[in-house]
Amino acid sequence: MRIVVLAGGIGGARFLRGLKAAAPDADITVIGNTGDDIHLFGLKVCPDLDTVMYTLGGGINEEQGWGRTDETFQVKDELKAYGVGPDWFGLGDRDFATHIVRTQMLGAGYPLSAVTEALCERWQPGVRLLPMTDDRVETHVAVDLDGERRAVHFQEYWVRLRASVDALAVVPVGAEQSKPAPGVLEALAEADVVLFPPSNPVVSIGTILAVPGIREAIAEAGVPVVGLSPIVGGAPVRGMADKMLSAIGVETTAAAVAEHYGSGLLDGWLVDSADTGAVGEVEAAGIRCRAVPLMMTDLDATAAMAREALALAEEVRA
Amino acid sequence: MRIVVLAGGIGGARFLRGLKAAAPDADITVIGNTGDDIHLFGLKVCPDLDTVMYTLGGGINEEQGWGRTDETFQVKDELKAYGVGPDWFGLGDRDFATHIVRTQMLGAGYPLSAVTEALCERWQPGVRLLPMTDDRVETHVAVDLDGERRAVHFQEYWVRLRASVDALAVVPVGAEQSKPAPGVLEALAEADVVLFPPSNPVVSIGTILAVPGIREAIAEAGVPVVGLSPIVGGAPVRGMADKMLSAIGVETTAAAVAEHYGSGLLDGWLVDSADTGAVGEVEAAGIRCRAVPLMMTDLDATAAMAREALALAEEVRA
């Protein structure tokens, strides 16, 4: 079975770990969000790709969900001693090595997709990890700071401001001019199932869908497309997805997110058992829906979620 | 008193520490060798400038004479895990931060001289540290490897091969097209004394002198030019200067090095007490010479050497 998964960072990475356990023989291609990418200290940092790679490759800091395990911060401390910022993005020494290798390869002319493949040679994530695009796309968030409207990089909004101010708009800068990375459209054309993990529907999945050609390829693939709600009981399971949903005028409910994707894209939707009441509304919108436990508390629980998603896909297909 | 010092790495840096102690009120400008510079992992590394900066700024690893104190090697270990080389150049985590800042500033368009000034803002070396040039100059060494003549980067010869094969030629690639960095010719024109520390006469001082205009500016400054022999008792005090001297056909003796610089450039020359017999030969070549202890065993001994050099300069002037 060929499964294509659109993934952001932590939520996508953890779901993928469950999916690998649930479908060990499946051929899994991950289309990773690169809208969170940022240049720091002259280095290209790809937080979402790295979170998937480290999580599936056994190098992730399990507690925080991002960054490397057994991390140290000598480089960061030294950069601070030089007065070179920003200091709000916590890059560890081990993590720096990844960004140094990536930046060197990009500088030598390799596209991000080739660089990602090279990095995965070491990590052996057990999936094919593709960036959504080799082109530069950067998610910017419009905010009101001290009475002035400003656009800040997503990471500045998310990490430095901790989403403490309202997002007035979310713009994947460069997306319109971007092209899907090599392999993305081919993987979608050959897929048996497409899954949307419980990733942020705006700045993770939404950004991937903003790359011209990807949404169309999913719709035209003619295979079941099943998503898992990142909203449980009217709140994001983790992160600050509510701020992002407000920015695009979508309610923070499991049903509203399904309807935002729409029946033209989504065939099936899993909501948490706590949201059983939403099943009727989602089905009325033309999307098959089931309520099951959606908390990724451990690998077993996450694998069970992946099995439910695949089961719903089979139900859709039949 | 305005003193200009041409400096390589360890020898130059340690001598400068003694000079600062010997002449605390002097205005010292250091023209640093950049022929040892190398691009590693996409980062610009300037070993000699950094050795001077770290040594005078209190950040040097005293035992090895280069690199940072209390160093760790997480980034290096990770790069090795990625299979990215070279692994023979020992960059520590703290040191990496310097190269990251430098590379980012160079990428933003600042010349090396401005970058060096910015890095020194933190280190406060107590001297004005100038790279010999803002242009790229790279010392290459011609060697015979497995019967084949090859040119290798100086660092590859020095660090990887540990000068274990003969150097057939030493070429400062790019030197002919280079220009002295801003401030270099001005400092020489305003100098009261010019000193050559016991640095490598070929790949340190020699490379600086290969930048068109610097040798002429020293000769035309009309002030005493005094050097200290890096050769004691027919062998280099440290490093492998003998290999470099052989490559340019100069004997490894204190007198031969003085004659290599020549009386057109050098007015005074200090040899070690062990080489008292060389004084006559050097003076016969038109260079005033004194035999004094030249081992930089501690700060006092080094300061005494600096005082002897300044005394010889005054003798030349009078």
Image (cartoon, coloured by chain):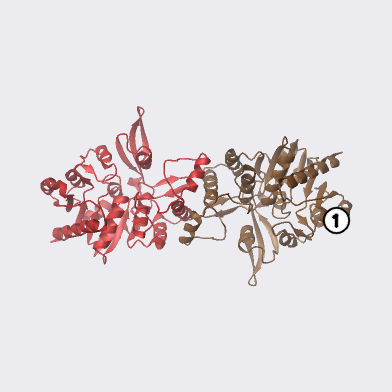
Chain colours: A red, B brown
Question: Disc 1: which chain?
Answer: B
Tell me: B167 left or right of B83: right
* Frontmost residue, A294 versus A243: A294
Residue B248 placed where, x, y %?
A: 75, 60
> Would you say B127 lies left or right of A115 here?
right
Asked which secondary structure carries label 1, the reply is helix
* Residue A51 percent coordinates (x, y): 35, 53
Q: Amino acid at mark 1?
A: Ala
The reply to whether residue A8 is visible in this rendering is no
Q: Nearer the viewer, residue B314 or A251?
A: B314
Name the image quarter holding residue A144.
top left
Quadrant containing the C terminus of chain A in the rendered view = bottom left
Is residue B185 placed above or below B46 in the rendered structure? Answer: above
Q: Residue at x 69, y 66 (%)?
A: B166
Q: Which residue is mark 1?
A: B278
The residue shown at (52%, 41%) is A81
